[in-house]
Image (spheres, helix red, strand yellow):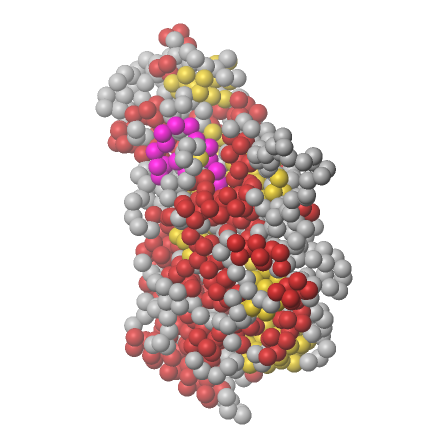
Amino acid sequence: AKTSLLAIKVYNFESKTADQNLYPGFVMCKDTDSLRVFRSLVMTHALTLADEESSSDDSEFDFDGEESKRPPPGAKSKAKVTVEDLDALPPEYRFLAAGEFTFFLDDCEMRVQRKQEKSMSGMDTLQKVCIVRDDDLPEELRPRKKEKSRKPGLSSSASEKDTAWEKSSQGTSAAGDDDAEDVAQSIMQRAAEEIAARDCVSVAAAIRAPLVLHGLRVAAKKVGVPEESVTFLVEVDQLRQAAEAISPTSAGALSMPRLRLVKASARNISERFLSAASAFKLPVAPETSAAASKAVDRYAGLADEEDPLPGLDHGMLEALRGPFEEVEAAMAPALEVLQRKNATVNKVVDVAKKKKWTGPKKNVVICGGGIAGAMCAYHLDSDEQERFHVTIVDPKNYFEDPTTQPMLMCDPGKVEEGRFANSIAPFSKVVAKGKHVCGFVQSISKTHVEVGNERTVVPFDYLILAMGSSYASNIKVVNPTAEYRWKQHQAELVSMKNAANILVIGGGLVGCEIAGNAADRLHKANGGERKKVILVHSGPYLLPRAKNAHKYVYDFLTSLGVEIHLNQRVVEFDDMLQSYTSDTGETFSAGKVYRCTGPRANTQALKDAQSDSVIQAALDEQGFVKVDDHLRLHDAPHIFAAGDIVESRMFPSTGAHVVTGKVAAERTAEFASVQGVVAVENIIRTVQGEEALMSIDCSRNVNGQSLAIDMGPEQGVAVIKYEVAEFYKTIGFDFGGDPEHLKQDGVSLSDKVPGVKQFITSIAAKMMMDPDTHNMFWGMKKGYQEVIDPLAPAADAPAEEAPAAEEAPAAEEAPAA
């Protein structure tokens, strides 16, 4: 049956209005549930209100309720309620756990008798029901007390009077035929939990299930095991499986494809994880790492001989066994944490528990902590009137500027300072008053999102979808910790330095930036010789959406020694032989490959079977989210979308494609943040009851989308109209470039672009943490040409002595930022 999120509504019987002093939270119900089952769910949920929020430094990784000994949803509650359980609860919530309440329908207009609860079922009924304390009812409406006994386990310390408990109670009896419905509920719940826990029975099982794998990474962080330990286990396990798929070990005979695979992969794993110089630090004894690395090198050397002996591949795999088993043993505490997390399915996150609320607030959930999501989150979390509780759902625990990744690969700097340190903002600062739920969004309904393998439920009043995009290569990643992300950059740098050639596939903005930086920044920042870089592009022009940009980019990359191949597509990939063949038959050899053929929208959650039909219908043919002009989903006005996942019409363009003539959207971080501003301002106005909302009309941008393309430490390409560049100078952003080239082509080489790009990166991170920086740029983005604000102040009327309007000179329109 379909599940839905229901708020627990406690009413004051006398006033027949909701009790604003209580926030009991939510429970997940099936469409077929009866009020009797709902009573059981409420009682069980109430016990969790005693759970304490962790105050540890890594609290953003605390699994909600992971240490709780409370029974899971759907379990029978009454028999497990003890005096200690009730005493642990805040006094105002004890009546819920004790079952001392009565159901009413239609805002307290119709009372439901206990004996009716089993027969009244269905979502229509559940949505109408509210709860009233038995003690608040007139004597004639209170449930009859039991004649022979008080409720088990309820002492004077837990309740000041005997519990009102009927003989015929259909919701809380502990035995008898009437328990069939509770038994069925428990069976279904246990079945769901068994499915969720199936992939957590061992470390080996966990690393083979993508959703569980992310949870294992988070659990490793929680118990103090370096995150790279999980990556090491995954890569060794994948190598074993791939080798067996080519030729089983039991076959015994020499298989050259298997040997090539194992040799290349085992060497790579050994260099990255087991060498003394590696940035990755595994929980492995030094002598174990040294012995494994030495053995891999010895067997790999023998495999390079003209006529290699059988068994060398098996020798390399066996050499990795020792480190693998030590890491696996070190992961045992993390596995226990993961198993506790997956023991409960559809647990509802109490988003308000972290901070006590001072009054009614709106739950705003933001899926995705990229440039749009993090900016939205910080603004709402910093609301001076404290009207919102903000929850970020993201698999990472930090914001990172995605536009700086091509430069970070070649020059990450130190973990404490440099480009990497300036490009991130921890979510603990982005939502200092709110909450971060670490995980992948699995499904989306009109009331909640489900997160992670165990489908933890996060309720909302307003939702912002900002999951961003991803590439085939690891340009954007989703690992949980910033510490590991920096190590990834260090490992990527070593990999680039060790590669004889670097192949970049795709000649768009990202591909050109990677090619330029690999050809110039890599050796200048780290020493050594200039690398041979090969750039393969499917069309006749680089940066085809930016008119006139090709000749500037092509000539500059060529001057750096980049080997450019146009009108070719790489169609065959042989990573073992490091050989890549194009559709023209040309073969390229490269030790490092970057696939930059365009990002994909991260909208998988909208396609999930558990997602609401309105949410599923929001996707267009390309997989982007369709919205109205106010960035709201159609038929779901409380759900907004911003950033790379939004449909193309909501982005400006750099111009017509130089080959096809089609005008395509230019999805930039700059305009993603503009969309975030509009979405948040519209949420605030909706809460205030204001009907005049902001909207976006990209046809108003007559200047086109500006681009700053970093091609290395000394040069870049500015795609920007001369008038716009002059305007940017007035606010401190000097794109440089040759004025004549900007006037003629709207493009120019510039030695100022690399500095501008790095400055923008530092500002992007500051916007998510620093109020002055945030407010300054928030105000700027509200004034973009594409933004229509019906509440913006009108231009001052002309003074009486001013000439008539038709005689006044036309004011020059400010260029778009």
Q: Position of residue 619 (x, y in %)?
A: 65, 46
Q: Report the residue at 40% width, 68% height from top.
A: 413
Q: Is residue 508 magenta?
A: no
Q: Is residue 716 left or right of residue 149?
A: right
Q: Is residue 141 above or below residue 267?
A: above
Q: Report the residue at 61% width, 65% height from top.
A: 739
Outermost front residue: 801
Q: Report the residue at 50% width, 88% height from top.
A: 304
- Residue 662 visible in this rendered orientation of the protein: yes
Q: Is residue 671 above or below residue 564?
A: above
Q: Position of residue 637 (x, y in %)?
A: 60, 34
Instruction: Looking at the picture, tell me which residue is in the foreground, 590 or 306.
Output: 590
Q: Report the residue at 50% width, 72% height from top.
A: 714
Outermost top residue: 140
Q: Position of residue 754 (x, y in %)?
A: 50, 66
Outermost bottom residue: 306
Q: Is residue 390 left or right of residue 583?
A: left
- Residue 473 visible in this rendered orientation of the protein: no
- Give the magenta part as a residue range: 351-366
Q: Position of residue 195 (x, y in %)?
A: 49, 48
Q: Is residue 363 magenta?
A: yes
* Residue 808, picture quadrant: top right
Outermost right residue: 660
Q: Main secondary structure of the magenta part?
A: loop
In the rendered image, the quadrant that contains the N terminus is top right
Instruction: Looking at the picture, tell me which residue is in the foreground, 123 or 198.
Output: 123
